[in-house]
Image: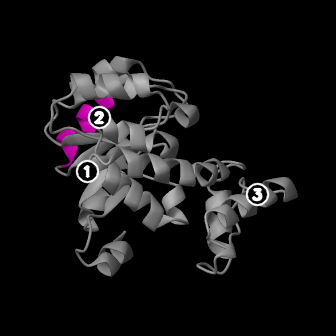
């Protein structure tokens, strides 16, 4: 985090991932991120132990009371097995340091309900590239993107158009990037993104640490086809 803060040098905010399924550990990670100069933290919903909605609220309340730093909740039930419901998000929005949520449930119904229930200044970010454009059009503020690892300019242009209300341009970019969005998950993430960066010559190796493994031949062909279609190779 310290290296990132130093490299960025104030050009954009640095948001550090400090989530854990142990509240005390999440507090310690958040304290460390603040000490390292992070501008905000991203705190994933506790995984594996499947807390209740009350448990989720108390988890975030404890972090907010322990560390004074802006916090973005991160809902990704496909990985955590727990879905923080819109009513609980709205409750958490009442905590002083909770400023927004990365919503990766994949449900526009849920995103809509979060936006409806939370204050106007609460930042709702899509956590899924394929819902990024529609999320912004119903009141979201942007996306925390996987596809932007290999195509940052295109994703940024799509978000800029959507935020400006240019539906035609946003729609065109959405469908141009749509095959690439899918290819980022044709094999367990982040393997496709890292392999894509290797193919582009941006990193020396897309090798992953176990338990993640290298892409198989079929998935690699899918990735290359999508990247060629997007003009990246």
Taking the spot 32% from the left edge, 22% from the top edge, the residue there is 113
Specify the segment rendered in magenta: 57-67
Q: Which residue is mark 1?
A: 164
Q: Foreground mark, 3 or 2?
A: 3
Cα–Cα span, label 1 and label 3: 40 Å
Taking the spot 21% from the left edge, 27% from the top edge, the residue there is 118
Q: Horizontally, is 144 left or right of 179 in the view?
A: left
Taking the spot 37% from the left edge, 73% from the top edge, the residue there is 4
Mark closer to the chain start, 3 or 2: 2
- Residue 93 in which image quadrant: top left
Q: Secondary structure at mark 2?
A: helix
Residue 141 position, x and y percent, is 28, 45
Report the disc number at residue 60: 2
Q: Quadrant of the N terminus?
A: bottom left
Answer few, some or many: residues within 10 Å of disc 1's Cα (few below 14, many 20 plus, some between 14 and 19).
few
Q: Is residue 211 magenta?
A: no
Tags 1 and 2 in contact by the CB under 8 Å rule?
Answer: no
- Residue 100 in which image quadrant: top left
Residue 208 can be seen in this image: no
Which one is in front, 22 or 183?
Answer: 183
Tags 1 and 3 in contact by the CB under 8 Å rule?
Answer: no
Q: Foreground mark, 1 or 3?
A: 1
Q: Check the image and report above or below for 150 versus 65.
A: below
Residue 104 position, x and y percent, is 46, 37
Answer few, some or many: residues within 10 Å of disc 2's Cα (few below 14, many 20 plus, some between 14 and 19).
many
Report the disc number at residue 96: none
């Amino acid at each position: 985090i310290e290296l990132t803060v130093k490299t960025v040098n104030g050009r954009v905010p640095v948001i550090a991932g400090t989530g854990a399924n142990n509240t005390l550990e999440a507090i310690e990670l958040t304290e460390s991120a603040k000490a390292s100069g992070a501008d905000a933290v991203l705190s994933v919903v506790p995984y594996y132990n499947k807390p209740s909605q009350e448990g989720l609220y108390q988890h975030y309340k404890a972090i907010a009371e322990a560390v004074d730093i802006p916090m973005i909740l991160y809902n990704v039930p496909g990985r955590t097995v727990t879905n923080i419901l819109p009513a609980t998000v709205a409750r958490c929005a009442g905590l002083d340091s909770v400023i927004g949520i990365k919503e990766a449930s994949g449900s526009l119904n849920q995103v809509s309900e979060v936006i409806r229930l939370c204050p106007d200044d609460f930042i709702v970010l899509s956590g899924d590239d394929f819902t990024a454009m529609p999320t912004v059009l119903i009141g979201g503020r942007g996306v925390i993107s996987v596809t932007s690892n290999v195509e940052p300019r295109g994703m940024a242009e799509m978000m800029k158009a959507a935020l400006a209300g240019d539906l035609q341009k946003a729609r065109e970019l959405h469908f141009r990037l749509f095959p690439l969005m899918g290819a980022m998950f044709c094999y367990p993430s982040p393997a496709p993104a890292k392999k894509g960066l290797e193919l582009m010559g941006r990193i020396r190796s897309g090798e992953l640490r176990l338990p993640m493994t290298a892409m198989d031949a079929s998935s690699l062909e899918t990735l290359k086809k999508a990247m060629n279609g997007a003009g990246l190779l």
